[in-house]
Image (spheres, rainbow, N blue to C red):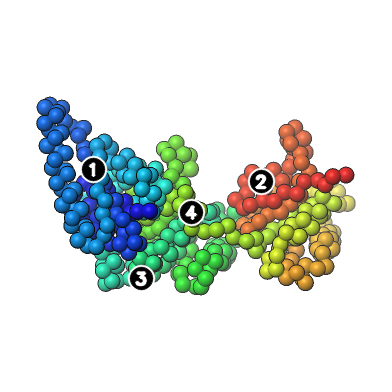
Amino acid sequence: MAVVCGSDFSERCNETATLSATIARRLDQPLELVHSLDTRGVLFNVGAVLASIEGAARQRLEAETARLRALGATVNPTLSEGWPDEAVLDVVKRRGADLVVLSAHGHRAPDRATVGKTCERVALGSDAPVLVVRQAEPLRQWLAGERVLKVMCALDFGELSQGAVGWARRLSAVGPCELMAAYVDDPAREASRLGLRTGAGANEVQQVIENELRDRLHRVFGADTVRLIVSPHLGDAAAGLSQLADREGADVLLVGTHQRRAGQRALHGSVSMDLIRHAQINVLAVPSGAMATVQPVPAARRVLIATDLSPLGNRAVLHGLALLSAGARVRLLTVVHPMQMPKAPFGRAIKDPAMQAEFEVWREECRKELLAVVPADCAARGISVEVEVVEHGDASAAIREAAERIDADLVCMGTAGRTGLAAALLGSVAQGVLRHSRRPVLLVPPGQP
């Protein structure tokens, strides 16, 4: 493994190379210093001009290598021709880089520098995290032991942010850090994801999100050593994170990246690329490929098991419970449809005041049926089970929303095995959950007759 730094020998790049050398020494890794010859403007007397350019570049590369070695780093210089991003990515691939460090460039004043295409292209193609340096002084002071580095890690509810969280720990190993975890959300969108009632207040939504994220951070760091910030924000998430980082005085903004290309960014956007381009602080982008060695797959501790109270659905309950070990917490769920209450007049919603009493009786009967499905030995095995009856017009959506509310590690349910035309005509709750859920899903098919 190695730390890779690209340089064009400008003052800003020399500052970044110094930081890279110190980080590499702290990580006990070599520094790969890369310079690419830009020969695209050579049109006349090509041979002599190219020889002169190469000779001058080699002298500057040797001098820079000697300067960085004097800092105690092991430095391997690389001189190449062609596009700078391709040169850096080639070294990243050949050397198995652990980190790439690049300086932001632009035509603005130094304190307003923006990245060029090199930084963006490297971030899109690198298997290793990419640190884009805009403000070198806080990093220099941190590495010199003169200050604590304030690191803000951008969180979401997917697997991607786990890589960023893991790199927060790596930075703490290099030098003392004050860690913050930030989540920028739209309360209305999050209320919909969680399946909270219409009109749920921002404080209620924020509390649910905070509880879930705090639990995730506790799994990684083992204690409440990370300050969690959940900030309601309408609009662009990258702008919200950038403003929050500026308000909190962060020195580095850590973010996971899907490395989406232009077409994908047009459809889905890219928070990481927007931050790399426009944030006015240092940005460390951690690609999805860097996650596998950061966080193992967690054990299933919070499990949602859904049943329609049919023999097939209840069989899935038994299968799901049989797989769990002591300490697991299970939410046993069934969904009631507002237009399908037994013995109700056709087309009459259960929210009709005339049917409310009958609905409450039905809901209680469903709760009793759920409790009756739970094996008697669950408590003895250390598995806690609670039941919930949810009213919803779309059973698959209700199951997904419940899984989000409890931050489920696993969703378990039965499936009738409908496919093709049968699924189109009769519907398939299992397919609806499987297609749209962001949680692992275990489907239990019908048993053999």
Point out the tag, 4 or 3, that comes first from the N-terminus: 3
Tell me if 162 is positioned left or right of 250 in this view.
right
Q: CA distance from mark 2 to mark 4?
A: 23 Å
Tell me if 448 is positioned left or right of 29 in this view.
right
Q: Position of residue 274 (x, y in %)?
A: 38, 48
Point out the tag, 1 or 2, that comes first from the N-terminus: 1
Q: CA distance from mark 3 to mark 1?
A: 34 Å
Judged from the image, the secondary structure of the residue bearing numbered disc 2 is helix
Q: Quadrant of residue 38?
A: top left
Q: As shown in the figure, which amino acid type bears the numbered disc 1?
A: Leu
Q: Which mark is residue 79?
A: 1
Q: Nearer the viewer, residue 388 or 100?
A: 100
Residue bearing the label numbered 2: 434
Judged from the image, the secondary structure of the residue bearing numbered disc 3 is loop
Q: As shown in the figure, which amino acid type bears the numbered disc 4?
A: Met
Name the image quarter holding the C terminus.
Answer: top right
Q: Quadrant of residue 282?
A: bottom left
Q: Position of residue 295 (x, y in %)?
A: 52, 59
Q: Is residue 270 above or below residue 361?
A: above
Q: Which mark is residue 176?
A: 3
Q: Position of residue 170 (x, y in %)?
A: 41, 63
Contact (Cβ within 8 Å) of mark 3 with mark 1: no
Can residue 239 be seen in the rendering of this structure?
A: no
